[in-house]
């Protein structure tokens, strides 16, 4: 049974109870009138004919019947008005349900929250119109019966909660969908906020690390600059000492002569490159305190050794004669090939005072004039041939015209 049918049945039952109550009141009134008539007749005239009470009784019965007829007519009138009110309420409820269904379809097809809000408002308005149906039914009754109809509607409303209509269902569905959408949007917004916060945190760490690295680099650079500034004088003094030691070791006669006269020798560094002796080698023009050239010093290399490279350095006077030579870098076999070095023997002394034309530049094993170390013939011969190339290059090169060292 639908909620409207239940409400109609309750109203019919109330009308029948009213008619029964009216009949009971009419019957009681008739009995009371009959009793009053009998008492009055006994007091006035005990001798009267017994037909009088019968007449009174008949009159009372007629009156009660009239009252009962009037009550039944009023009850029928009220029942008819109630049925009309119920029909009107059902028609309005049906129209509200159709409108709610249309609003629900519109709310489901649209993602805008405004549509959901309109559907909720329309459904609420429909419920409000449905809830007002008892008052409309009460207004449809006659003026004497308005209070009684209003009390019946109020009793029916308080006695049982209004049933859930189709519009309420549609409203609940639309509200649930809106809440779900809001929750999804909130969750997505929270995830996006969390990702953004994580990215910002990582970027902040990277920025801080970069700043600290730049700060450390700046501090180290400033420290190096201050150190270089403070140590520059010591470096210059050490360089001069090394130059004087080099001159003394490779141009010993020239160095001793200048020291005896109280003079001082100086270097002018040049860059020497030649296919026979190597590239970007340092060559020095040695001058005295009168700026006169007194000798030359230069490095030279060879790839004829047993283990390459083999780099040597030699000092020449202005006539192209060797003053001294020495080994700067050697990877020859320890204990065998390294015997050509001055710290291991006097093999290099045989080159002192020699020029390009003074000797046959090869080892004796291959028809030359120079000795060689047994077991290190390759290294010995590589050193002799490299020195010959060095003398030829220095003889054909104007060292003073070479580019300066940077």
Image (spheres, rainbow, N blue to C red):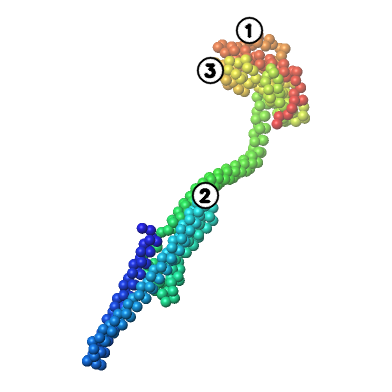
The residue carrying mark 1 is: 366
Q: Earlier in the sequence, mark 2 or mark 1?
A: 2
Q: Against 173, is 273 above or below?
A: above
Distance of mark 1 from mark 3, alpha carbons?
A: 23 Å
Quarter of the figure that contains the N terminus: bottom left
| Element type at mark 1 | helix
For label 1, the crowd category at 10 Å Cα-Cα, with few meaning under 14, some 14 to 19 and many 20 or more, is: few
- Mark sitting on residue 266: none
Q: Is residue 104 left or right of residue 324?
A: left
Residue 197 pos. (x, y %)? 52, 48
Quarter of the figure that contains the C terminus: top right
Q: Residue at x 38, y 58 (%)?
A: 2
Distance of mark 2 from mark 3, alpha carbons?
A: 96 Å
Q: Is residue 252 left or right of residue 398?
A: left
Can residue 183 be spotted in the picture?
no
Q: Residue at x 53, y 17 (%)?
A: 335
| Element type at mark 2 | helix
Cβ atoms at labels 2 and 3 below 8 Å apart:
no
| Element type at mark 3 | loop
Q: Nearer the viewer, residue 277 or 117?
A: 117
**Which quadrant holds residue 70?**
bottom left
The residue carrying mark 3 is: 335
Q: Against 66, is 111 above or below?
A: above
For label 3, the crowd category at 10 Å Cα-Cα, with few meaning under 14, some 14 to 19 and many 20 or more, is: few
Q: Earlier in the sequence, mark 2 or mark 3?
A: 2
Residue 206 pos. (x, y %)? 55, 44
Can residue 215 be spotted in the picture?
yes
- Mark sitting on residue 109: 2
Q: Residue at x 52, y 58 (%)?
A: 118
Instruction: Report how many numbered discs are placed on residues in the image.
Output: 3
Q: Nearer the viewer, residue 195 or 232?
A: 195
Residue 245 pos. (x, y %)? 65, 28
């Amino acid at each position: 049974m639908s909620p409207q049918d239940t409400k109609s049945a309750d109203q019919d039952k109330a009308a029948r109870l009213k008619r029964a109550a009216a009949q009971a009141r009419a019957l009681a009134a008739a009995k009371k009138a009959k009793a009053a008539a009998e008492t009055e007749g006994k007091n006035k005239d005990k001798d009267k004919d017994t037909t009088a009470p019968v007449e009174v009784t008949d009159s009372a019965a007629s009156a009660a019947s009239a009252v009962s007829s009037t009550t039944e007519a009023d009850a029928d009138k009220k029942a008819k008005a109630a049925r009309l009110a119920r029909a009107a309420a059902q028609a309005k409820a049906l129209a509200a349900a159709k409108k709610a269904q249309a609003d629900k379809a519109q709310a489901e097809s649209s993602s805008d929250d405004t549509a959901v809000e309109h559907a909720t408002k329309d459904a609420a308005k429909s419920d409000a119109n449905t809830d007002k149906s008892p008052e409309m039914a009460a207004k449809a009754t006659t003026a004497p019966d308005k209070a009684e109809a209003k009390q019946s509607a109020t009793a029916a409303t308080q006695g049982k909660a209004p049933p859930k209509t189709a519009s309420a269902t549609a409203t609940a569905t639309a509200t649930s969908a809106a809440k779900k959408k809001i929750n999804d949007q909130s969750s997505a917004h929270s995830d996006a906020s969390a990702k953004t916060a994580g990215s910002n945190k990582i970027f902040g760490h990277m920025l801080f690390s970069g700043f600290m690295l730049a700060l450390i680099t700046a501090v180290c650079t400033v420290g190096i600059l201050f150190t270089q500034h403070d140590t520059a004088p010591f470096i210059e003094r050490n360089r001069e000492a090394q130059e004087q030691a080099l001159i003394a070791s490779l141009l010993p006669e020239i160095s001793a002569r200048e020291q005896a006269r109280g003079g001082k020798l100086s270097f002018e560094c040049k860059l020497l490159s030649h296919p026979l002796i190597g590239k970007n080698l340092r060559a020095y023009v040695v001058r005295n305190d009168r700026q006169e050239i007194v000798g030359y010093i230069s490095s030279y290399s060879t790839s004829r050794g047993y283990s390459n490279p083999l780099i040597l350095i030699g000092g020449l006077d202005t006539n192209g004669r060797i003053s001294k030579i020495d080994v700067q870098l050697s990877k020859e076999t320890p204990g065998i090939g390294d015997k050509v070095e001055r710290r291991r023997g006097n093999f290099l002394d045989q080159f002192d005072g020699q020029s390009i034309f003074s000797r046959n530049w090869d080892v004796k094993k291959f028809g030359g004039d120079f000795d060689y170390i047994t077991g290190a013939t390759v290294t010995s011969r590589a050193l002799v041939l490299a020195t010959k190339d060095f003398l030829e290059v220095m003889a054909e090169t104007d060292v003073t015209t070479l580019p300066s060292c940077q």
